[in-house]
Amino acid sequence: MINKIRNIDKYLLLDLAFILIAIFIAIYTRYIFVDYTQPIKSYFFNGERILTTNDAYHFATATRDFINKHFGDDAFYPLASYELPSLLSAAVYYIFPISISSLFFLMPIFVSSLFAIPIYLITKELSNRYIAFFASLLAPMTQGYVNRTSAGYYDTDMLVLTLPLFGVYFLFRILKYNNFRDVVFAIIFFILSLMWHKVSATYILGTSIFIAIIYVIAIERKNIKLFESLGVLIIAISFINIFLKLFLILLILHFMSNRVLIFNNLTQSIKSKLKYQSLLIFLIAISVLLVANMDLIISRLSTYITGNMVESSIAIKSTHGTILELQPLSFANLVERVIGDYISFSIASIGIILVFIKQPKTLILLPFLILSLLSMKIGMRFAMFGAPIFSIGFFYLIYFVTLYLKRIFNDKIVIDTIKAAILCAFGYLAIIPNYYYTINFLLPPISYTGEIQALDSINKDSKNKRDITISWWDYGFMIPYYSNTHSLISGTDLDGINHFIASKILVNTNQISSYNLAKMVSDIYFTKDNNLIKLNILDRILQKYNTKGNEEVFFNSLSKLSFKDIKTNDVYIYLPNSILPITTVIEQFSDIDFKSGKPTYNVDDRKLVQYNSISKEGINYKLNDSYIFNPNRGTLLSTKTNNILQFQKFHIIERKNGALKTTTKSYNDDKSNLHIIYSKELGAFFAIDERTNNSLIVQLFIYENYDKNLFELLYTSTESKAYKLK
């Protein structure tokens, strides 16, 4: 007996050692990025680390509010402050001696490395601990996973795979052993997964359970107890009140357990009368799932994956197709992101097919494979979901091949030596390319010091946390963090409604219209009118001013109405240099037909092209080594195609006596609606259409041409500008 215990301890220690080594290597490879960027000033603002994704500032702001005890109306994201990422980060902050900015920058490195644990556990169930060790080394270093879990990428991606994968691991053990303890652990990780990222957890775990149900019906239908286990897991991922959910789960577990802790006689009496207890639990769970989950599933599919427009008083352009991470991947990029190269991908693909055939219970991992393959259709962010299944598949094939060595060799030492050689050789083939990718991976800061300075100036000027800063959604989460003001639009606004409003303000060619609409937004944003609170911002405005059915007339009238005397919180406009290249994209959200949501113009007619490389050749300017601009004729010649563009006007902008001055030269060709701008301060030429040239963004950023009665220039530099509405 003592020897048996010693053997168990020895193997347990070996498992722990392998897991810790895998986690350490995952941390080490990511931490190189931290050391490398330590002396680089562009990664810091006021001594604090700048994060590497805009979404990171969502939970960074929510966590900071929680730590500073700002709750309810005093918090920028009241709900997010109580969500699991914020609570976990706050706990780490209180336990470890670490600054807030370091916390946000370093947490992704350490937390995402825990991904090695479920990879090890699942692979070990399918093969052995040595195969599992290599798989747990590979998965955290796959490119798709590294891209979204490196330093500064403080987002839900840190655990978006790890928590559901733990849940799937215990689901696998339920199908294999149907152990009550595994059911309990599965419930815990199912609930944690939902608390971490509701949508992805629902699709992954919901699909896994569905596959498990099919498996049980097809193969294990005589094991009625499995329906109990699957039923309680269905309730665990249902969107019902958390207290009701916990009550139902505890009640069901009470009847499932062989060791009843309370109400023993009553429990035994009820159980004796329920002949079909397992099926009853299962049917109850299915009912809860259908009632509680369908709305979320359908709505998220509509706004996040499809291009359907949102119901509003105006037909709104969908954000689908404008989100970088939802741009489809090529097959070659998918291969790189899930495992590194074609050879490894081919081996892993064979291994995946083999493990599904040999161990059909592993089909519950199919959602990870499907999501990764769908990245070629619905977006690159989903490629990371292939990390677990391709890593497991790769090494499972190696394991399967080595099993046949016993048929060739009789000597155990020879067999073990060849196994080790094959494992190390193929492990090297798959791991080393991903290892070098990880240690050399660098993400630029999401913004630079010069762009953040404008937000800092807003922070210093603002006297109220309910002040509003208007910019584009690319900067939405940064605005509260650095300016301490609310943002009209942010990365979670997928329905396009706030895009319409922000676009209507930012690219309007009439500054009075932009001013009036911005004032309206501030007036209605924190309304306490019960009839308006339930509406989105756009419909609040339309209902308050009784303009439903006459929306187009209303917006056209904003150029005449004056809302300057309305008492509202302060309103700011934030314009970083990086907003210029996307100005024509922003226009697509407001220059639309209000009934169809389609652009009212030919998208190809809108242009804003920037040329940063400039050299003088006589009277001509050579731009980006490919174009020659003749200021006398107003023509731009392509040296590659010999195509010529004719401009209507040439603007030279330079700063004199502290203000930007514009000199304009007109050409005889009235048919052209193109302007060319030479901003000496920005050191760039811009080829731009007339409508975009007159937009608020261009006028305020490139020209600093603004109505002094409406706007006040708060901060200006070549990298960013901040304006305050008077």
Image: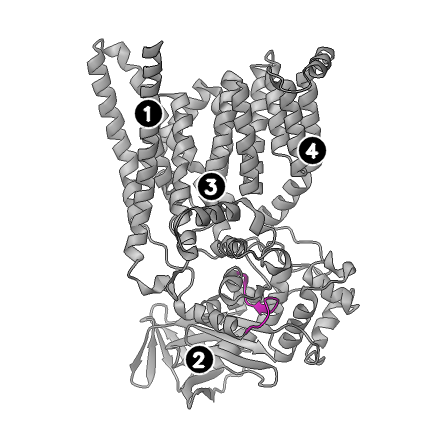
Tag in front: 1 or 4: 1
Residue 679 horizontal side relative to residue 614, left or right? right
Instruction: Kindly tell me whether residue 654 is visible in this rendering.
Output: yes
- Residue 273: x, y in percent? 74, 12
Tag in front: 2 or 3: 3
| Along the line of sight, the residue nearer the viewer: 26 or 10 | 10
Q: Residues within 10 Å of mark 2 (few under 14, many from 20)?
A: many
Which residue bears the numbered disc 1? 13
Q: Which image quadrant is residue 46 in?
A: bottom left
The outermost residue toward the bottom is 657
Residue 463 is one of the magenta-drawn residues? yes
Which residue bears the numbered disc 3? 159
Q: Amino acid at mark 4?
A: Leu
Which residue bears the numbered disc 2? 677
| Along the line of sight, the residue nearer the viewer: 125 or 87 | 87
Which residue bears the numbered disc 4? 290
Q: Amino acid at mark 3?
A: Leu
CA gap between label 1 and label 4 equals: 44 Å
Residue 232 horizontal side relative to residue 123, left or right? right
CA gap between label 2 and label 4 equals: 59 Å
Q: Amino acid at mark 1?
A: Leu
- SS for dot 2: strand
CA gap between label 1 and label 2 equals: 68 Å
